[in-house]
Amino acid sequence: MNVDHLLSSFDMVFTWYNLLAIVAGVVLGMLFGVTPGLDATSGTSLLLAFTYSLSQETALIFLCALYMAATYSGSITAITVGIPGTPASASTVLDGYELNKQGKAGKALAISISSAVIGGLIGTVALVSLTAPLANIAVKFSAPEYFMLALIGLLIIGGLLGNSRVKGIAMAIVGLFITVIGLDPFTGYPRFTFGFMELMEGISYIPVMIGMFAISEALFMITTLDQKNPYKSGTINNNWPNRKEWKQMVKPMASAGVIGTFLGALPGIGAATANWVTYNEAKRISKEPEMYGKGSIEGLASSEVGAMATVSSSMIPMFTLGIPGSTTDAVLIGALIMHGIVPGPQLMTRNADLVYSVFIALFVIIAIMFIVGAFGVKFWVKMLQAPKGLIVSIILTMSVVGAFSLKNSLMDVWIMFASGILAFVLRKYGYPIVPLILGMVLGQLMQDNFRRALIMSGNGFEIFLTRPISLVILLFIVIGLVYPLLKNGTKGKQKKKHSSEVIISD
């Protein structure tokens, strides 16, 4: 780690406006997290346009604070009312809400914030330790490698999300097509603009993100306005775990921290998947697996550590390769590009002070999050009492202002509403919207580097096979496509064989 960059980054972070940005990001992130239906992705996408007037480091620090706090605070509603505030807190319900029903809500909330802090620290240490070495490797990449990386990112994410791999990949292709709209970057020829001058610059994914995450959620809320508010709050006080309980939680927390960090560094996994994986692994190695789902403090701690470890570690591929490690990281990449910063291997050399300032800020964010989480639980639970109509009004107002302020264009506002309606319909029919957004994020990277690679090779495809790194990534892509098919085929044969045995035995 460069000491000069580290010292200058300390000066950047510990200014009154950056510290204020951290506090504001944590508070707003907690607000988004405790509001069911909203999460870190909707929060960062909704407020992304508002960071346009901020400096580069302040904008990124603010969004990172919002990201981390929103990921944690979904556990507050999971514990108090049995409804996860965010997908990252889904497994928290199993033991957290059960502890609440046993009269141990304070204990569950204290374990939740403590585990979240530990998970955040583990992920941040991994981010600080691994980013520079990986960036030194990634700096050797050229157009063929960038294209392959973007492709593998799309395939991984498209396959993981939604009920169907086909649906996920189809939505990613739609996102790729949207990036084609506008002037060709190599020839300047207009593509799919249909005579609209406003489309010459292409469709920005920022209003699309606001529409698909915020507007679609507002539409879902509107359809349930007449339903009775299920949230209620009682007397809640923190009850910190004792030494015996800490000793009991050490092993599952350590396991969850390592697994969560690894999963976070893989593009497309995210906290929503990591909290289930770490929970199941903790249950597997536990001496009392029968207690899981019945108020196990081990299960609660492992869920929180696993989910929070992914937040910082998911930034590793973002900083080193320019590929979002999660959906929220796609928004952070949008923030970097909006502020004139190119994410990827060159980021550590061209904007080292910015990257180091994020490293330092993450530790400060975790400290502020602990303070707000430990002493502000009662207030956040009260927020659940807000009428849905008020929440919808705030979302719609902020969405319109955010989309319009980006370029002072009404076209962006209409694109936002159209995207929101489209996302509402897609979600109704089980189509995931995240691959579409990531298709837009990675689409420009794919088409530009694909064409550059062809120019480098004289319009031949052999360049993707003759360069070692590109070939290795291509093999990973092939394995990623073929393995699920072979696995499903094996399962189908086993099922058919089992059915035949049943018929014979009958």
Image: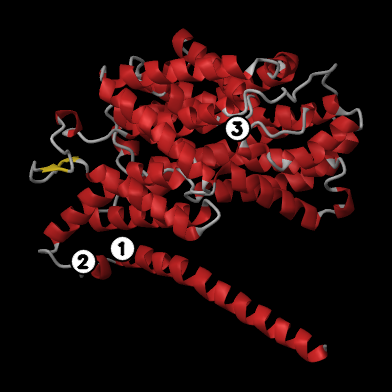
**Residue kind at label 2, given as amino acid type:** Ile
Please rate how many residues cluster around mark 1, counting C-alpha atoms within 10 Å: few if below 14, some from 14 to 19, many from 20. many
Q: Which residue is mark 1?
A: 470
The residue lying at 59 percent from left, 17 percent from top is 389
The spot of residue 7 in percent (x, y) is 43, 23
Please rate how many residues cluster around mark 3, counting C-alpha atoms within 10 Å: few if below 14, some from 14 to 19, many from 20. many
Split into 4 quadrants, where in the image is the N terminus?
Answer: top left
Camera-near label (2 vs 3) is 3
Q: Is residue 299 left or right of residue 364?
A: right
Q: Is residue 90 left or right of residue 234?
A: left
The residue lying at 62 percent from left, 39 percent from top is 87
Q: CA distance from mark 2 to mark 3?
A: 41 Å
46 shown above or below 149: above
Mark 2 vs 1: CB contact within 8 A: yes
The answer to which of marks 2 and 1 sits earlier in the sequence is 2
The spot of residue 188 in percent (x, y) is 8, 41
Q: Of all residues shown, which one is farthest toward the front? A: 226
**Residue kind at label 1, given as amino acid type:** Ser
351 shown above or below 257: above
The spot of residue 398 in percent (x, y) is 45, 17
In this view of the protein, can residue 240 be seen by the observer? no
Q: Is residue 212 left or right of residue 347?
A: right
Q: CA distance from mark 2 to mark 1?
A: 8 Å
**Residue kind at label 3, given as amino acid type:** Thr
Q: Secondary structure at mark 3?
A: helix
The spot of residue 93 in percent (x, y) is 76, 38
Q: Which residue is mark 2?
A: 463
Q: Is residue 8 left or right of residue 201?
A: right
Identify the colour scheme used.
secondary structure
Q: Secondary structure at mark 1?
A: helix
Q: Which residue is mark 3?
A: 71
Q: Secondary structure at mark 2?
A: helix
